[in-house]
Amino acid sequence: MTLLSVQNLSIVLPVGADRSHAVSNVSFDVDENQIVCLVGESGSGKSMIAHALLGLLPAGIEVDAGALMFQGMDLARLTPAQKRAVRGDRISMIFQEPLTALNPLKRVGEQVAEAVRIHAGPMPAKAVVAKVEELFEQVGLPDPPRLRRAYPFQLSGGQRQRVMIAMALCNNPKLLIADEPTTALDVTTQRQILDLIKSLQKTHDMGVLFITHDIGVVADIADKVVVLQKGGIVESGEAKTVLTQPTQPYTRMLLDAVPGRGAFRKVGRSTTPVLEVRGLQKRFVTRQGLFAKPREVVAARDVSCQLAPGDTLAVVGESGSGKSTLARILLRLVEPDAGEILWHGASVRDMNRKDLRNFRRKVQIVFQDPYSSLDPRLKVGESICRGPMAFGTSRIEAKRLADRWLERVGLGPQAFDRFPHEFSGGQRQRICIARALALQPEILIADEAVSALDVSIQAQVLDLLNDLKVEMGLAMIFITHDLRVAREIADRVLVMRQGQIEEERPTEELFESPRSDYTKRLLDAVPGRSFFAARAGLGVPA
Amino acid sequence: MSLRAILSRLAGIVITIFVIATINFVLVRAAPGDPAAVIAGQSGATDEKFLQQVRAEYGLDKPYLVQLGAYLGKVATLDLGYSYRLRRPVKDLIGERLGPTLLLTLSAFTLSLLGGVVFGTLAGIRHGKWSDLAISLVALVLYATPVFWLGLMLVLLFSIQLEWLPAFGYVDMRAGRLGTMAYALDVLKHLCLPAVTLGAIYMAVYARLMRSSLIEVAAEDYIKTARAKGLKEGAVVRGHMLRNASLPVITFAGLQVGAMIGGAVVVETVFSWPGLGRLTFDAVTSRDYPVLLGLFLVMSILVICVNLLTDLIHRLVDPRLAVR
Amino acid sequence: MNDSLRTFLRHPAGTVGLAILAVVCVAAALAPILYPGSPWDMVGAPLRGPGTLGSFLGTDTMGRDIASGVMHGARVSLMIGIASTLAALLVGVTLGAIAGFAGETIDLLIVRFIEIFQTIPNFVLAILLVAILTPSIWTIILAIGLVSWPPLARLTRIQVKSIAAREFVQAARCQGQGSLSILLRHVIPNAISPIIVTGSMTVASAILIEAALSFMGLGDPNYMSWGYMIGAGRTVIRQAWWASVFPGLAILLTAVAINLIGEALNDALNPKISRS
């Protein structure tokens, strides 16, 4: 039976936005006891639809046409009091970032209890506590009586999202709206939360509207899927049908853009390494005061690895694994406590200022956040020129070089005189690549360089990097949290966890027969793994 | 708060006090002319014999480091020197003026914080409406008003024109005879104008801060969560915005205590309030440096104490600090 | 920068502020022309009300012309406000930039130093400084500068620290650019806007401190200032309200104007560009 019926929904944006409507003419249904995924890239309007359902659209943005029929009422036309009666009761919602979605100054149990009390009417305090603890039990939080009294900052990301889910479930909602609930989480945690939502959906007979950008997640949990692009529906239907026999080119492109499905890369024969790391150690100690106890985080514990010319090494790990610190240590942006870094056999740690400059010229880096890695006050061409000019290239020559590189990364020389804010995330990342390569490096370090990008853009940037690598004979260190990206681009993969190397193997071996339990868990957690394996015809049953 | 944190705090306080005392010491030596004359002040008796006596007492003939050591030792034993002009130990002079100043600053502090939070909240939740504009405008003007002038204008209005409140002083001579209750009431009547004067300026500061902080908090995700629970708007403001938004205000109020004590100096001068500020004015007028130096030290210590208090409040409001 | 200028000029608060400040500046510039005599000279009977012939804002207890005092006072207020802010900027920005860009130990030391200075009641320190060093324009500027730098240092430190941690700074380092060049070309230009805004507001607070100092009798005895006039008019407020009201209004308007300009600058220089 239909639970929610979105009919011809249009959401109007304020004057001056990049388009007139966030969403136009969107219709789909959510049945009872069903998971419907809204999937789309950034700017598709998927989140707006979710917010419109609960009347939580930001000021200036409103529903201007269509109906949101839920149990015989139109959600778009409720009075404020009626809206409040529905919110958190029959329809509840969980959000992307569980840290910011919880009030930092209130105990998590109290925040859940509040949701219980609003809709249940007067209730003895003891009963509320019992209810909260029961909910915590249900969402798999350990030791509910203790955790109930914790503050959000004392919980892990996964635990916080469980609290959010407990809060959403407390009044047995008919419909749960989940807005990218796993995007901010590590991959293994994401897997747990996905499993939890799926099982709770069954036990509570809920309809779930699940918003995501990751088609792998769709493959894992959706009964039905609605594909959105720029505020309109591209394709919708049963998940199985849409995913296996997409009729629209956009859907096909989304599926094809998911990295890590092609043949494994051939491992090059081992030669003398360009870069070698031995026994790297790094602890971060933060002092809070004269006598306060310092806090300690281990970022590298006895890390050793090698990089051969023309090779690509992927360093994979969850947050806090020390993978990004490793990149910074290699460039001596962060000084290690102990260990050796050898560049063609020369110790990087013993280099004087001049040698270090020459070393850094040969080892360039592209960062994760395309918004903070370009100086906002500098024309992008200028940013590229600065490097070669620092090494004595004349201004005219540097400008010519910058033009050539802008052309090569697909932007064209007319980009030279524009400022970073005029470019999209993907374009900025291309500029960063141009900036790095203009110095003719031997090694390129990519620190989560494609993580902030939409999947279609991600595929393009990965392709570009691959081409350039071959063209220039670059060796690459690719730091990523995403095993699919690693599989796509790397010859060898190094898995890190809490500053230690779990496993380092050629990509194919690691994916086909992982040795460490942790690697296995990581691999199992990759969303849509079995679906894509089946799709690629590799014989793993879907 | 762990023992380590407490120790760390205490060490910080001791260091601060000694740095301030050192500033005092350096200032006297940096003054043009003979330090002995500076200490003696324009006490009338600036003959050589008297200066000799001062020099001997302060060890001014010894090396600077020895002098500094001696001075710090005196500070540590709460010996703040002697006012040759008033012929009394500075400690006593300050001691008898401390009460009125504490009364004035604490009332003004409370008034400004409460008023600032209330008005700032009103403006913040009605962001962009006329009441926000009105509050913001008044705050903007108050923020730019010289505090002594505001005091005079209030006197002009409430004492001279309307004759509601006394223009100056701490208590009427007659009130002392009428019993404790009447005495307290009379002090309260005298307190009104000075406390409002001093409080209003800082109220404006805190209201502006509270307003912008509230607008920022209103955009946080957890406010969306609260609404998604089905909470009423009033409950969202009370339960989730107020406490969070007042955190930066409390921090800032702590930082402003020093400035507020400076304001008290001027306000006490305007209203002839018999506190440390009035004593400062008198000491400035008569160039009584030992008193000024002692006042500076004591007021700094006052600031440190209030900072400790705001820190404590901060810890009560923000659990993230309490755990550390 | 052109965009910023346009935003600033379109800002209603900014234009009002600029207009008021322009009036104050004109008053300061015209003072010696309109009132060539010393503002300390007696021009008529004491305590004459405003509007009377020859003294349209009235006279004070000594028969001095209030209007002349207010105009001459503008010179002193603006001069001291700007000079002491520049002094505070010099100390604050230098210390803040060093703390933000240098290593942990230096940073910790400077932060402690700033904290101590923030604990000290700044007005009381200013009183002490001026009283001991004897009041003059220069000691007043020195004293106000010395008590106004800590907020600027804090802000600069935080700004520099946050910009220096941004990835484009690390990228510049990897490009082979030197530390000083990075600080001057990348960090400071990106960190400077809020410092300019706070600096402009510091002028207003400096003017207020100067007024309070001269009110306490610690002004330069050679120059007529607004604070002194209020202090002198205070005792006769029952008989001659004009002696203290007009100089106070002058201070108030000037400070309001500067704060309005600061707010407009803030909106013009720190637009909240959304990232989406």
Image: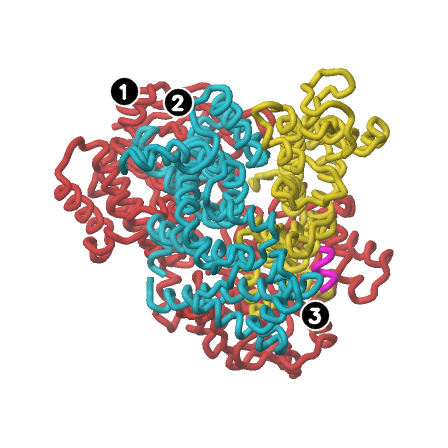
Chain colours: A red, B cyan, C yellow
Residue type at tag 1: Gly
Label 3 lies in what chain? A
Tell me if residue A292 can be seen. Answer: yes
Residue drawn at (47%, 73%), measured in percent from left and top? A283
* Most frequent secondary structure within the magenta stretch: helix
Front position in the image: B229 or B205: B205
The residue that disc 2 covers is A7
What's the distance in space between the residues labelled 2 and 3, CA to CA? 57 Å
To which residue does mark 3 refer? A362
- Marks 2 and 3 in Cβ contact (< 8 Å): no
Disc 1 sits on a residue from what chain? A
Tally of numbered tags:
3
Quarter of the rendering occupied by the N terminus of chain B = bottom left
> Do labels 3 and 1 touch, CB within 8 Å?
no
Observer-side mark, 2 or 3, equals 3
**Circle 2 chain:** A
Spatial CA distance of label 2 from label 1 is: 13 Å
The type of residue carrying mark 2 is: Gln
- Distance from disc 3 to disc 1, alpha carbons, whole Å, reads 66 Å
Foreground residue among C189 and C87? C87
User: Mark 3 or mark 1, which has the lower sequence index?
Assistant: 1
The residue depicted at 29 percent of the width and 37 percent of the height is A34
Quickly name the residue at label 1: A72
Residue A206 is left or right of residue A47, and the answer is: left
Q: Residues within 10 Å of mark 3 (few under 14, many from 20)?
A: many
Q: Is residue B192 above or below residue A245?
A: above
Q: Which residues are magenta?
A: C180-187
Q: Is residue C31 left or right of residue C263?
A: right
Q: Quadrant of the C terminus of chain B?
A: bottom left
The image quadrant of residue C56 is: top right
Disc 3 secondary structure class: helix
